[in-house]
Image (cartoon, rainbow, N blue to C red):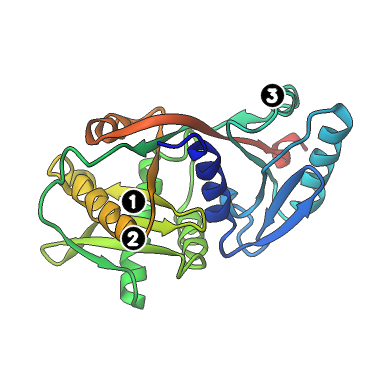
């Protein structure tokens, strides 16, 4: 693993979040905005923050209010390259962290490849509808949203913003006995970094090797496509991180989302 991998992974996360959304470059950060989907954090946030001084931080937070005026959420995606002074200010100003993501990079070959699966890309309207149903189940389960009570309408917004990332980010479904039982996405960034994202398996078919097989298939395709690094994110609060570690993924950094709902303050 080369020394620049953490920087390339941070750049890949930012690139992936910006797909399908408008971007505004500022002096000390990059703002991503999508007024059509105001509740989706990945579509409405600031990242790549470099602000260190009180004045610079004030400017970023003022721009956050201005550029995200269409949503009650103020969202900052941060990583290991975000200045500590900015993080401290977020904590002081009442921002809260949502589940921390462990950035995990595959070292060498996978130790397991799972079971045989019927894996197909999401291409038709029927496919997108099937994906939407699984995303709604995922949201209802609540693992990725912390203590938020999210609706089916929110799940539909997530699918729409995900769909806008095509063709750079390709979603796939795993089919079993005529029904979609799992999904995930892969994307190859300009950094030649392969991202495996949004993995979910229905509870009734877990522990059969489906997630492992999905990761193996994605890894093969990303490497065959020229990616020299493959990584995924694991929620620090959830069990799948141990599966990824057993497969050969190693933690190299943390990514955190800081949020504040200004609507609750009025």
Q: Kindly indicate the quadrant of the structure image that contains residue 159.
A: bottom left
Image position of 234 with respect to 12: above or below: above
Instruction: Characterize the local packing of mark 3: few (<14), some (14-19) or many (20 or more) Cα atoms within 10 angstroms.
Output: few
Q: Is residue 245 left or right of residue 90?
A: left
Residue 221: horizontal and vertical position, in percent? 29, 60
Tell me the element at label 1. helix
Which comes sooner in the sequence, label 3 or label 1?
A: 3
Q: Earlier in the sequence, mark 2 or mark 3?
A: 3
Disc 3 element: helix
Question: Which of the image's four quarters has the C terminus?
Answer: top right
Q: CA distance from mark 3 to mark 1?
A: 36 Å
Q: Is residue 100 at all visible to an observer of this figure?
A: no
Residue 164 image offset from top left, x and y in percent:
52, 67
* Residue in the image at 51% along x and 53% along y: 191
Residue positioned most to the bottom: 124
x%, y% of residue 65?
79, 45
Q: Are marks 2 and 3 in contact (CB under 8 Å)?
A: no
Residue 178 position, x and y percent, is 14, 67
Q: Are marks 1 and 2 in contact (CB under 8 Å)?
A: yes
Q: Residue at x 57, y 47 (%)?
A: 11
Q: Which residue is mark 3?
A: 84
The label on residue 133 is 2
The answer for how far apart the CA atoms under marks 2 and 3 are is: 40 Å
Residue under numbered circle 1: 137
Mark drawn on residue 1? none
């Amino acid at each position: 693993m080369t020394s620049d991998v953490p920087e390339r992974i941070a750049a890949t996360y930012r690139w992936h979040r910006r797909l399908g959304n408008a971007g505004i470059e500022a002096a000390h950060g990059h703002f991503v905005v999508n007024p059509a989907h105001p509740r989706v954090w990945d579509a409405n946030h600031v990242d790549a923050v470099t602000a260190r001084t009180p004045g610079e931080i004030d400017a970023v937070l003022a721009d956050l209010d201005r550029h995200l005026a269409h949503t009650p959420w103020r969202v900052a995606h941060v990583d290991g390259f975000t200045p500590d002074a900015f993080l401290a200010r977020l904590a002081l100003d009442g921002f809260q962290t949502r589940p921390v993501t462990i950035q995990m990079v595959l070292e060498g070959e996978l130790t397991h490849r799972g079971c045989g699966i019927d894996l197909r890309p999401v291409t038709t309207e029927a496919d997108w509808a099937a994906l939407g149903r699984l995303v709604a189940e995922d949201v209802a389960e609540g693992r990725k949203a912390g203590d938020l009570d999210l609706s089916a309408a929110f799940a539909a917004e997530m699918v729409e913003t995900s769909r806008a990332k095509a063709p750079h980010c390709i979603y796939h479904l795993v089919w079993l006995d005529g029904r979609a039982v799992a999904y995930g996405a892969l994307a190859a960034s300009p950094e030649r970094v392969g991202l495996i994202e949004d993995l979910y398996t229905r509870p009734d078919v877990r522990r059969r090797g489906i997630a492992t097989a999905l990761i193996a298939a994605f890894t093969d395709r990303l490497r065959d496509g020229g990616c020299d690094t493959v990584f995924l994110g694991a929620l620090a609060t959830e069990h799948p991180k141990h599966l990824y570690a057993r497969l050969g993924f190693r933690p190299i950094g943390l990514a955190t989302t800081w949020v504040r709902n200004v609507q609750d303050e009025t």
